[in-house]
Image: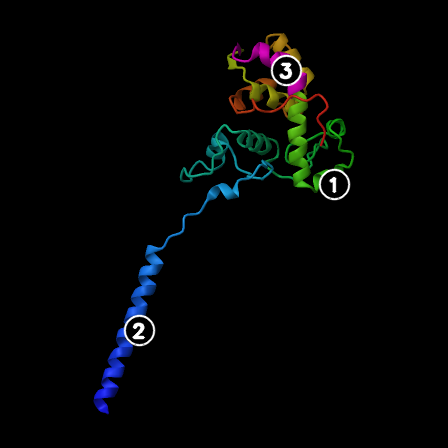
Amino acid sequence: MEQTAIKINKLLKVSVLFIFLIILLTGFSITKEIDLTKYKTNSDSFCYLVPNIDEAEFIYPKEPSYYLYLGKSYIGFKEALGFKESRGNYATVNIYGYLGKYQFGKNTLKLIGIEDSEEFLNNSYLQEQAFNANVSRNKWILRKDIKRFQGIQIKGVQITESGILAAAHLAGAGNVKKYLRSGGSLSFCDAFGTSIEYYLKIFSGYDTYFVVANRKAKV
């Protein structure tokens, strides 16, 4: 009887050890490959709220150099411009009444189909859509100037499409036309002293080529 109990005990120990080994081997040997293509998104309306390299080095000069950089992509363009305009703050209104992350004026919002500035200020998705629509509209207005001046230098600044579109966001497409066609002699600064030249320079070389020029762009 005692020997039978010993045998059963040994059998249980071996069984437990065997089960444990199966679990261990299964856990480490069976790996399922994830198909990331199922998680693609066609939207670029996500809010990354990160500075570009120059802004990050200015704000965090003593921190280690590991930040999320979006490079020269269109999202990088939007985020760099939004960070420059408002530090990426959707809820901000400056002392001159410009609204949101990209600091839109109410007249510009009306041009792209937005009448309710209060709703605009409280809707981050609407602000991103407004930015996209405004870029498309400005690209249509400046399409001839982009073709004519892209790649040349004015006052030591290389002219690029993204720089032109950023400058149009700052100063309006009409003022950018005057600047380019005058060779830089007819310049413009906003109320804070930011110039067309500055935006042409710091927003140079972003990938905005796929943006569709649309005179009637609306949100």
Secondary structure, mark 2, is helix
Would residue 63 be found to the left or right of residue 17 on screen? right
Q: Give the extent of the magenta segment.
A: 139-153
Of the residues under marks 2 and 1, which one precedes in the sequence? 2
From the image, tell me which residue sits under label 2.
Answer: 16
In the image, farthest residue toward the right: 115
From the image, tell me which residue sits under label 1.
Answer: 119
Report crowding for label 2: few under 14, some 14 to 19, many 20 or more residues within 10 A (C-alpha): few
Q: Quadrant of the C terminus?
A: top right
Would residue 201 be found to the left or right of residue 142 on screen? left
Q: What secondary structure do most residues of the magenta stretch adopt?
A: helix
From the image, tell me which residue sits under label 3.
Answer: 143
Q: Position of residue 208 (x, y in %)?
A: 56, 24
Secondary structure, mark 3, is helix
Q: Amino acid at mark 2?
A: Val
Instruction: Tell me the distance, in whole angstroms, between the alpha carbons under discs 3 and 1.
Output: 31 Å
Query: Where, by quadrant of the figure, is residue 4 drawn?
Result: bottom left
- Residue found 61% across the figure and 11% down from its top: 180
Residues at circles 3 and 2 in contact by the CB criterion of under 8 Å: no
- Residue found 69% across the figure and 30% down from its top: 104
Secondary structure, mark 1, is helix
- Residue found 31% across the figure and 68% down from its top: 20
Q: Amino acid at mark 3?
A: Arg
Q: Disc 3 or disc 2, which is closer to the eye?
A: 2
Would residue 160 be found to the left or right of residue 15 on screen? right
